[in-house]
Image: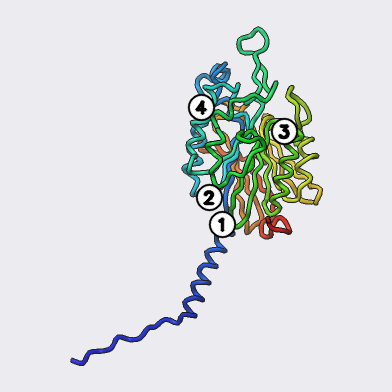
Amino acid sequence: MKKLDAPNFTPNRTAVFFWLAVMFLAIGLRAETRPFTLVVLPDTQCYCDTRHAQSAKKWGGDLRRYFFDQTRWIRQNAKRLNIAFVLHEGDITQTDHPDEWEIAAKAMSVLDGKVPYVLCLGNHDMGYRKTGNSPDSYSTAHDRKTLFNKYFPYSKYQKLDQFGGTFTAGRMDNSYWRFEASGMKFLILSLEFKPRDEVLEWASMVTEKHPGHRTIALTHSYLDSQNKLTKSGYPVQGNLGEGIWKKFVSQHPNIFMVLCGHVLGEGRLTSKGKAGNPVHQLLCDYQGMKNGGESWLRYMTFYPKKNKIEVFTYNPSLDTFMKGPKSRFALQYQMSKPSASTADK
């Protein structure tokens, strides 16, 4: 029998390269338009309240399970929601006590190596002072002394890809972080409770060095539930909402969002910065609700193709959503074009 020669299917290199280029371009375009999510953890102080155990007395039992419900839910849904970052709005603890910090550190460690996160300091995380004759009477933020850096040490975070730096060497009280999502660069500035002028100057310097990064400011007290900027309160010196807006947030064209807690309830304000850029300023704090917040959190899903941010308020423990207009809403945000005219050097 005559042996048949195999047909010659020598590929056309030009055609192969063309289709490979088309395939990689399509993959890149999908990545640049894929929705992604930021999760916001509001005040968790009641979940960590052990020194005076006021929350346990009020609601009948230890509440730390709700903190763990939050972080476990984030970890379990990181892929489904494409969670890029978690931001804690401060009042991590109730009275800056070692036992309370241990709860917080263990709860947040659920996210280690899975989802990057950043925390900011609230008034309950610093300057604790016993007051009055009652065993449960105390006040906070008399000074900036805090155990935060013992339980969330610089050494743990300094080598992470997202970590940028700090205001004070070796201390996490004020820090900045960078990440990329859907082809966009983002910068997060975590600022202490009532940031001092020198901290705001540092934050401005960092922001100016990242003109191509879309910037989020994270600080504990900024907006109240009447959609007004906070003005005064607490002995420690520094800036609240009005000062932070005037001296820092309004001055930079690449800042598009401010996140805060502190004041019970929800608030929302959109203002134009000095360059005409819209800045969405959002408050959420659920500690006054049943069981000190009962795991309520907020997550924001960014839809680049729609230039829209969908905001949800969700309870992992009860697997339910808040549906009121203050809890479930959408923000317009331009993502189809760069947020700044120049790229970072």
Element type at mark 1: loop
Q: Which residue is mark 3?
A: 195
**Horizontal arrangement in the rendering, residue 158 relative to residue 225 (left or right):** left
Rate crowding at label 2 as few (under 14), some (14 to 19) or many (20 or more) other CA atoms within 10 Å: some
Tally of numbered tags:
4
Disc 1 + disc 3, Cβ < 8 Å: no
Q: Measure how far apart labels 3 and 4 are at the Cα level.
A: 26 Å
* Residue at 69% in and 54% down: 212
Q: Which mark is residue 82?
A: 2
Q: Which mark is residue 34?
A: 1
The quarter of the displayed image where residue 246 is located: top right
Q: Earlier in the sequence, mark 1 or mark 4?
A: 1
Q: Earlier in the sequence, mark 2 or mark 1?
A: 1
**Amino acid bearing label 3:** Pro
Q: Measure how far apart labels 2 and 3 are at the Cα level.
A: 31 Å
**Amino acid bearing label 4:** Ile
**Amino acid bearing label 2:** Asn
Rate crowding at label 1 as few (under 14), some (14 to 19) or many (20 or more) other CA atoms within 10 Å: some
**In which quadrant is the C terminus drawn?**
bottom right
Element type at mark 3: loop
Horizontal and vertical percent position of residue 222: 72, 34
Element type at mark 2: loop
Q: Which residue is mark 4?
A: 103
Q: Nearer the viewer, residue 259 or 219?
A: 219
